[in-house]
Image (tube, helix red, strand yellow):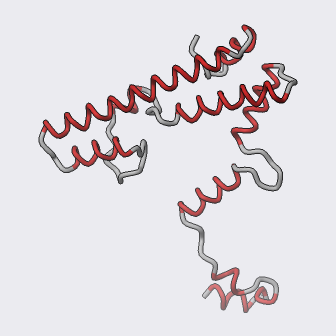
């Protein structure tokens, strides 16, 4: 009907029929497109690089070698933070029984989620919970070590900026 209406008004000569027949991208296609736009393309920096550039300005670092050392340590902190649960305790208290690999999609969380969903015995749930707790503690220790490594190369003023930026605990 849309094509007939377009033909009746002479729009078909302006808008090709292929444009009228194009399907709307689904949610995953739109998300993938957004991720691609957030990465380096056409010489534009991604979101992380923009944040690092602002930090470099606040740290008042002009030496590229010094900055590369500090930026590598900041990237490590950001990466390690991604391995820890996100959100407030209230959002963490609401379990996500969705698909494996979903929100908080670590293999340990998927294993625990599956145990709860499949009503496995308490002993099995306890084993999986202990394993997830161990992984969490290891990641937390790596994060503290990475933060100490960053703190070791910063001046007092730069450390204060890093604390305000949320990279280091006070």
Q: Where is residue 83 in the image (x, y as percent from the top left)?
A: 48, 36
Viewer-proximal residue among 126 and 118 = 126
**Relative height, residue 57 to residue 152 (above, below):** below
Q: Position of residue 39 (x, y in %)?
A: 70, 50
In the displayed structure image, the side of residue 133 where residue 140 appears, left or right = right
At x 60% / y 58%, what residue is drawn? 32
Height in image: 125 above or below 17? above
Where residue 34 sits, quadrant-wise, is: bottom right
Q: Nearer the viewer, residue 119 or 107?
A: 107
Which image quadrant: the N terminus? bottom right
Left or right, 13 with reference to 139 = right
Identify whether 34 is placed above or below 52. below
In which quadrant will I find the C terminus? top right
Give the x, y percent position of residue 144: 51, 20
Please identify the residue farthest to the top as the structure is shown.
156
Image point (34%, 50%), residue name: 98
The residue under the point 75% across, 10% down is 157
Q: Residue 2, how many percent across, how many down?
A: 64, 85
The answer to whether 134 appears left or right of 18 in the picture is left
């Amino acid at each position: 009907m849309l094509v007939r209406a377009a033909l009746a008004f002479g729009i078909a000569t302006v808008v090709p029929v292929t444009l009228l027949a194009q399907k709307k991208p689904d949610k995953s296609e739109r998300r993938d497109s957004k991720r691609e736009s957030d990465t380096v393309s056409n010489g534009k920096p991604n979101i992380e690089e923009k944040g690092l550039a602002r930090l470099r300005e606040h740290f008042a670092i002009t030496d590229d070698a010094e900055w590369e050392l500090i930026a590598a340590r900041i990237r490590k902190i950001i990466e390690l933070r991604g391995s820890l649960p996100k959100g407030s305790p209230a959002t963490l208290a609401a379990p996500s029984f969705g698909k494996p690999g979903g929100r908080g999609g670590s293999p340990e969380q998927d294993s625990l989620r599956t145990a709860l969903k499949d009503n496995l015995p308490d002993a099995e749930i306890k084993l999986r919970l202990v394993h997830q707790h161990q992984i969490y503690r290891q990641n937390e220790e790596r994060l503290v070590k990475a933060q100490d490594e960053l703190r070791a190369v910063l001046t007092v003023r730069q450390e204060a900026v890093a604390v305000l930026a949320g990279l280091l605990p006070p």
